[in-house]
Amino acid sequence: MSRMIGTVSRGVRAPIIRGGDNLVDIVTSCVLDAAKDGGYEIRNRDIVAMTESIVARAQENYVTIDNIAEDVRTKFGGETVGIVFPILSRNRFSVCLTGIARGAKKVVIMLSYPSDEVGNHLVSLDAIDAAGINPYSDVLDVKRYRACFGYEKHTFTGVDYVEYYENLVRAEGADCEIVFANDPRAILKYTDNVLCCDIHTRARSKRLLKAAGAKVVYGMDDIMSAPINGSGYNEQYGLLGSNKATDDKVKLFPRNCQPLVDAIQDRILQQTGKLVEVMVYGDGAFKDPVGKIWELADPVVSPAYTKGLEGTPNELKLKYLADNDFANLSGAELRAAIEEKIAHKDNKQEGQMGTTPRRLTDLIGSLCDLTSGSGDKGTPIIYIQGYFDNYTTE
């Protein structure tokens, strides 16, 4: 076995990106400079990935609380708005909630329990069991919630999100009522003007509410889907994937990213003669075992990627082959048998023991998110080598 190194994921440092910056120039130069600095060569099928944040920043894709308020007021008439299944996040939802409240006279917040959609827990399942509550059918008001669970705080942030969200709404001069349920239709007891704030289940929530007679139904993907007074926007995802930028402004998920990834691929090909794959990534798709948070609060892991990243991996499970098909072999014989099996594997993976089927962009995006982090590493560009190699690659 002459080659000992497999997949390598590197964080690439970049300057702080500002509105109007040319990301094709910046990303290409950073990747080439990093290769020179790190002493490695650009190879075919390497992967260049950049975080969605720098793309949105370069696009100046921001909206203010007043922009959100105006859109909510236009769509819902400025009266009572019921918001269904918002996630529990100061970064992801607090500014959006302030904008919603500014555009309404009353906000009814319906929180899912025991946790939000991405795993932030209000209470534990054990506490629900002890209280004799059925989360599939029981609708709780704040009084019963407090009587059963008290003032629970988030494991990591130390925030009581029930109190926090109510205070945000009332600070805008709007009335606020909070209820707890897991059927979106429960909101119709309080209002028939509904804003679905869930991310990955939003299509179902909208469908159920409309079928149940809701008068006005929108999702977060419908708010700021067009510019207001020259603001940013995202025609596909609206406020989904937004992050707090300042106390009165959010950065939206980037839009129209495909020309960017294609242009970077072309530029690197021109300068190196190598065809790399390029993608934009946001949240990875993985779960924290302690806080129970499923990381994916963006609508997708990757909003744009080059053609070579389509599909799912076609891989065999080496440990299964070693323990089953070739249990009587070892050493050079075992290696030769596995190499032969890999060389003739079925491209459709039908009837063969392989890896858990997930899209390449979801797997690679998760690797990128874990490599770059979201703090002060200063590496919004990730360079991956050897991802498409296998046991036989030299």
Image: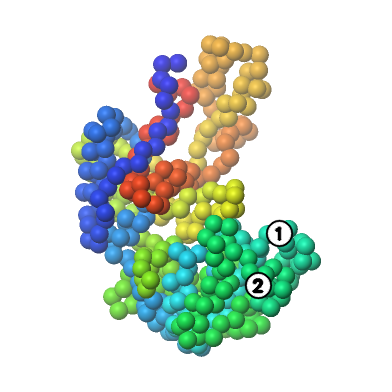
Colour mode? Answer: rainbow
Q: Residue at point 68% right, 73% down?
A: 146
Q: Residue at point 39% right, 41% down?
A: 308
- Name the quadrant containing residue 22: bottom left
Above or below, 272 against 341 in this view is below
**Which disc, if any, is residue 193?**
none
Could you tell me residue 144's position as x and y percent?
A: 71, 75
On the question of residue 8 being in view, the answer is yes
Amino acid type, label 2: Phe
Give the CA distance from mark 2 to mark 1. 14 Å
Which of the two labelled residues, at mark 2 and mark 1, occupies the earlier sequence position? Answer: 1
Question: In this rendering, would 391 be left or right of 62?
Answer: right
Could you tell me residue 390's position as x and y percent?
A: 47, 27
Amino acid type, label 1: Leu
Question: In this rendering, would 321 be left or right of 257?
Answer: right
Tags 2 and 1 touching, CB below 8 Å: no
Could you tell me residue 67's position as x and y percent?
A: 37, 78
Task: Look at mark 2 in the image and give the residue it sits on.
Answer: 180
Q: Residue at point 73% right, 63% down?
A: 128
Q: Which of 36 and 302 is in front in this view?
A: 36
Above or below, 308 against 287 in this view is above
Task: Look at mark 1 in the image and give the residue it sits on.
Answer: 125
Above or below, 125 against 335 in this view is below
